[in-house]
Image: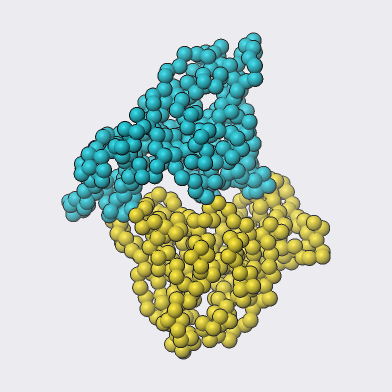
Chain colours: A yellow, B cyan
Amino acid sequence: MRKKTIYECKALYRDVFRVTGYEFGEGEKSVCVVGSIRGNEIQQLYTCSQFVKRLKQMEAEGKIKEGHQILVVPSVNPYSMNIKKRFWPTDNTDINRMFPGYDLGETTQRIAAGVFDVIKDYKYGMQFASFYMPGKFTPHVRMMKAGYEDVEMAKEFGMPYVVLRNTRPYDTTTLNYNWQIWETKAFSIYTTSTAEIDKESAGMAIRSILTFLSKEGIVDYRGHDGYISQVVEDTQMAAVRTKTAGLFESLVKVGEEVEAGQILALVTDPYEGEVLEELRAPVDGIVFFAHNDPLTYASTAVFKLVVREGKGLL
Amino acid sequence: MIETVATVGLPVDETLTIRKNRLQPQENILTGEKKRISIVTGIHGDELEGQYVCFEVARRIREHRELLTGTVDIYPAMNPLGIDSITRGIPAFDLDMNRLFPGNREGDMTEYVAAKIIEDIEGSDVCIDIHASNIFLTEIPQIRINELHKEKLIPLAMQTNVDFIWVHGASTVLESTLAHSLNSRDVPTLVVEMGVGMRITRSYCEQLIDGIFHLMAQMGIWKGETKEPRRPIISQNPDDVSYLNATTAGVFIPHVKHWEMLKQGDLIGWIIDPLGGEVLDEILSPVNGILFTIREYPVVDAGSLVGRLLREETLKEGK
């Protein structure tokens, strides 16, 4: 293992801003794994740290195959993590909206450019991503339909789902999109949580990546084969939306099977405790995303369900 | 008349409401088909220059309602939670509201609000979206135009009494702005940038207000006297603009004034280290030109923008 600084810049009074990478093995640039890019992505940091620990063992045991180099970057944004801000401390810009970056541009453009310059030539790129809404996910590999996606390859992770979604204008500035443009096979890996640690899904993500790397001949790993991934289009999921705002009490967990008509959550009056709304499943399905904030706004998609084919009402 | 554009319930005893003020002619004035202008601001909660513009436009119209011959819709707060909490984005979501358009009626709260706003503004003959840079940079009153829409927008922008019209290249990211969404729906929309975040620069506001009334007169919405607008400099070539970025972290101390003509090599400012008492870098003008953007917020990182210059050649061509 080689620990190295892949990007740094000085601040006025704070310690030097450093992005640290861990290299394993030697040879062609095979895999790059990126953890947190935003300051609240603690689970993404944790998952990377466990992956570094695991690769260290595997390297010692000679299980990283010859001719392959793996790079892990646990955090692209330690500055924001240390002061509990989601985006860049001074101008609140999101580094994951700055790729491929610009080395003569503004600060976060320079960080994106400096990091991307190091990570862009890898054959496979994996990012532990997070969602902007508060909630938990069933672990999955997410791909945007940018024209370069390889769904069959995504199934090699053996995660429960491979989710496909349409691109949006902002996607062109994300790491995942730019990796694809630079001909890296890129995958966004979602574990269950963001701001809190979920060991179970972090473990699943690590096993999934190792399963993938083993199938691609990069590591020697005989673990669990995982799931036969179900491919789901984001737009085909059934969203359950609030009509009212108030206290939010979820009655189900992510990954749980639910039946059409089942009550999934209650929205209650924050002063008087009366139930304002019962949120029911519109279809038979599996809870893919569940809001986990104790408050909810109105007009908010608080659940997303994977429809169980043949049984749904929709 | 104050009208509601969108409402969303918030969890604890509060409703988010986006409002507009619709000003229309007195009933006894006979006009043909009435034109409509929408004046929009407050998408970014820390940009306040437009607040004074909205106030003063409404005040002048109320004072002389008999001169109004069309519809003026004033939307002072697209992001009311942001303005009232000194937050640039949409609080809680930390989302840039100007990356959400055209929104989605079936989407989450932020997308729903964006969709309702577009729906409400659609049908306007012109929209002016007033921004105020950010807390870091001061801007001379200017209109920024996506090159995709320049044929339609430059003639309108010429009426608004700004100093500068900046035609910039198209970018996929900007497709999610309010202006792009409206321009794509045949509502010519001008994006004004002026002043600085968290402050109101009355002289710039008055300048733009005079321009808005002139444009309204040209459109047949206002029949009062208006001032002839100043002739703006127009830049359509990316090479016209020279960017000055800090080379190191420190505190920026300017040595020049905003909108000052500079010669190549003139000292624009220092980046200093207060701890060591050193000047870390001297920022010099790379070209002959005029400084149309200057840094307001002193603390810089390496890469922070400290200014933008418009090259001398552009000024000559512009005039």
Residue A271 in picture, x, y percent from top left: 64, 44
Q: Quadrant of residue A272?
A: top right
Q: Nearer the viewer, residue A296 or A177?
A: A177
Residue at the image point whose x is 27% and y is 54% from the top: B248
Q: Nearer the viewer, residue B294 or A19?
A: B294
Residue B269 in picture, x, y percent from top left: 23, 44
Query: Can see residue A197?
Result: no
Residue A44 in picture, x, y percent from top left: 50, 67
Q: Can you name the residue that lies furthest to the front here?
A: B317
Q: Can you name the residue that lies furthest to the left here?
A: B277
Which quarter shows the C terminus of chain B?
top left
Query: Can see residue B244?
Result: yes
Which quarter shows the N terminus of chain B?
top right
Residue at the image point whose x is 49% and y is 36% from the top: B150
Relative to B312, residue B67 above or below: above
Q: Nearer the viewer, residue A241 or A266?
A: A241
How many marks the image carries: the answer is 0
Left or right for A89, reference A197 = left
Residue at the image point whose x is 68% and y is 76% from the top: A228
Left or right for A163, reference B50 = right
Residue A277 in picture, x, y percent from top left: 73, 48
Left or right for A119, reference A214 = left
Relative to B64, residue A40 above or below: below
Residue at the image point whose x is 32% and y is 45% from the top: B242
Q: Can you name the residue that lies furthest to the top here?
A: B28
Left or right for B32, reference A25 = right
Relative to B36, residue B268 above or below: below
